[in-house]
Image (tube, rainbow, N blue to C red):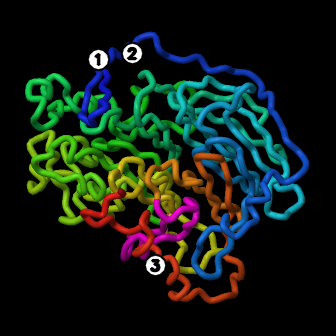
Amino acid sequence: MTGFRTGRDASGKITFQWRALLFSGLALLCLQCREQAVETLGPDPVSEQASKPKDSLILPGGFTSVVVADSLGPARHLAVNDNGDIYVKLRKPEQPEGLGNVALRDRDGDGRADSIVRFGRYPNDGAFATEMRIHNGYLYFSSELVVYRQKLQPGELVPQTEEERLVQDPYPIRWHNAKVLAFDESGGMYVTFSAPTNACEDGELTRQDPQGIVRGENPCSQLDILGGIWRFDAAKKDQQLADARRIATGVRSVVGMAWNPQTHALYAVNHGRDYLYNHAPMYYRAWHDAVMPAEEFFQVKAGGDYGWPYTYYDPFRKQRMLAPEYGGDGKTPATGYSDILMPLPAHWAPNDLLFYQGTQFPERYRNGAFVAFHGSMNRNPYPQGGYVVGFIPFEDGKPVGTWEVFADGFAQAEVLRTHEDAQFRPMGLAEGPDGSLYVVDSKKGRVWCIRYANPDRPFREADLAVLDRRKNTVSYLKQPEEGGELK
């Protein structure tokens, strides 16, 4: 079995590197030890800068935000307990203590964390540990290769129980390795095993014609073991892939997934592939790499095939197209694959999904879907896009209209040449017990709480006007025009 990575040389030309993946003997041992938590008490960790207007989020009328905590370190997802305690997953364990989780508590009720505790001493198997969820009284979290849980005891901020290892990934570290979780109503836990390549590129085929189209392995052997979503038991220890049931296939990279209790169904947001122009310049232009293909919002149906790597979704034609690596020419539709619910802007990286269940927010937001758009990295020579929290309205269990911007102001810049120009990148979402929405940033580890300030205030469509205007005027929100490259 082999793994495949793609890269670029100094001229921008695609290069390929094969490396052997040794699957045998790679099971990791869980470190079953008691936590050695590191706690910070005292002054609010929020810096003085956090109170300045330029750090405020741009929200619909009637909404306000407060910075709960700052500078926790590069973070991924978060969860909020019934008592308001917040748990944040760090990308990798914080050194030198080697603790990968953070617990936050607001002791004086001012909305800001004044107790910060770092905990979670488990193997550092990668730099993109992602998940943090609370389910049936347990705190679930994941490294790149392992899904863990710990029992939460009433009144305790940091769980003192042993870490239980629920799922072990049998393969080595690779691209798109986040273990994202969702839970159904009958004891099931859904886990993503995304695909490690862009389009299952085949280096041997491509080397035969280095000036031609990049070719894909056909059939793609990665789909035998990856590129899908599996259902495990939410309470069983030491499960392997063989113990689970594959629910869906053809998934490139899912970092946001959620169970919708209104429809009793699983939903996901998928990252579309990259490099249409680079792989097939005779059919695509550089502009196509910035605006295509769409990211995808879909309902995960048992037996569904969502088209990776053979297809991509064209947001202009509003249909699934055959990928150039598999004979596509930018004009040929692909049939026989599962439908999506809604295309989302290209390369915006939807990295979390949350169905709002509270009653604090106005009626139009209830049961709708919030999406954290982490922001693009590879739309050059055009400006980068995303870096907002979006919202998808639902009626009668189905999305209506189109996506809209709900929270802006994370980037703190009007034009983003690279993702490094963004001050903050929204990454994870969680709902508090009072119906507030929490957002965590991936670069510095800032946590915001968003509230509807006056529940008795009627919400008006005019409250969306500011964000609607920004959607069509700000460079990181509007679709770039061809020829509008950064100079």
Residue 464 in the image, given as x and y percentages of width and height? 51, 81
Residue 330 in the image, given as x and y percentages of width and height? 12, 54
Dot 2: few (<14), some (14–19), or many (≥20) neighbours within 10 Å?
few
For numbered disc 1, what is the local secondary structure? Answer: loop
Pointer 3 residue: 468
Mark in the foreground, 3 or 2: 3
For numbered disc 3, what is the local secondary structure? Answer: helix
N-term mark: 2 or 1: 1
Between 255 and 247, the residue placed more toward the observer is 255
Q: Which range of residues does the magenta coloring cover?
A: 390-415
Q: How far apart in space, not on screen, are marks 3 and 2 (Cα)?
A: 50 Å
As for residue 402 lying within the magenta part, the answer is: yes
Pointer 1 residue: 1
x 9%, y 54%: residue: 332
- Residue type marked 3: Asp
Dot 3: few (<14), some (14–19), or many (≥20) neighbours within 10 Å?
some
Q: Can residue 243 be seen?
A: yes
Mark in the foreground, 3 or 1: 3
x 62%, y 89%: residue: 458
Picture layout, residue 433 above or below residue 453: above
Location of the C terminus (image quadrant): bottom left
In which quarter of the view is residue 476 placed? bottom left
Q: Horizontal placement of 457 versus 207: left or right? A: right
Residue 258 in the image, given as x and y percentages of width and height? 49, 54
- Residue type marked 2: Phe
Pointer 2 residue: 23
Picture layout, residue 245 above or below residue 266: above
Location of the N terminus (image quadrant): top left
- Residue type marked 1: Met
Picture layout, residue 88 above or below residue 204: below
x 53%, y 70%: residue: 406
